[in-house]
Amino acid sequence: MLRTYFLFFIPIGFLLACKASVSLSGATIPPEAKTISVTFFTNNTSLGAPSLSQRFTEKLRDVVSQQTPLSLVRQNGDLQFEGYIADYNVTPIAVQSNDQAAQNRMTITVSVKYTNKFEAAKCFEQNFTRFADFDSKLNVNTEEPRLVEEIYRQITEDIFYKAFNNW
């Protein structure tokens, strides 16, 4: 009888001793975490559309709310993102034979601070940079919304994977 109890309770004890974590889309989230906050990311650049900050903040909020089970709160979440748009520029990258640019590159850098109240080792402060190329014959003002959307998609994925998968 005693042997039966050991065979039953020891495996259950091991299972209960394991630390569980919530995983959705491969994300590892502390089980204690219930909320997440994404503060407004300011635009610290002199270039770009005035809506850059709003668009980035909303994009990051969308990513974390769609890919985690956490409740999005205005501030002081169990997990927190804050930061600013650090750089925005458009530069020529390919020159044709007549010294004209054949292609331009839009580059955006976002500085992010991530705070995890439960796992201090997972906190970070890091710059994330991505770019998109476009034909120089196209007007940057008309191409900007599409390019920014693509760059923001890449940057928010990088931030998400760094915070929740430790890439």
Image (tube, rainbow, N blue to C red):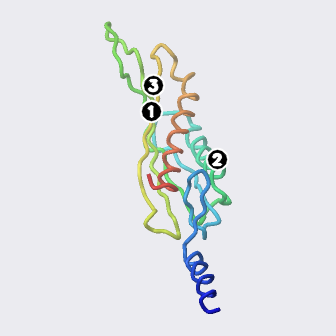
Q: Which residue is mark 1?
A: 131
Marks 3 and 1 in Cβ contact (< 8 Å): yes
| Residue 143 drawn at (x, y percent) | 55, 23
At 46% from the left and 45% from the top, the residue drawn is 110
| Residue 135 drawn at (x, y percent) | 46, 17
Q: Nearer the viewer, residue 118 or 37?
A: 118
Residue 6 in the image: above or below residue 141: below
Element at label 1: strand
Outermost residue on the top side: it is 98
Q: Marks 3 and 1, how far apart in space?
A: 7 Å
Q: Nearer the viewer, residue 130 or 143?
A: 130
Q: Which residue is mark 3?
A: 133
* Quarter placement of the N terminus: bottom right
Q: Marks 3 and 2, how far apart in space?
A: 25 Å
Q: Nearer the viewer, residue 53 or 117?
A: 117
Element at label 2: helix
Amino acid under label 1? Phe
| Residue 63 drawn at (x, y percent) | 61, 47
Residue 41 in the image: above or below residue 16: above
At 56% from the left and 55% from the top, the residue drawn is 27
Element at label 3: strand
Give the mark count: 3
Q: Which residue is mark 2?
A: 62
Location of residue 104 by image quarter:
top left
Query: Horizontally, is 162 left or right of 56 in the view?
Result: left
Amino acid under label 2? Asp
For marks 3 and 2 on the same chain, the one whose residue lies earlier in the sequence:
2
Q: Marks 2 and 1, how far apart in space?
A: 21 Å
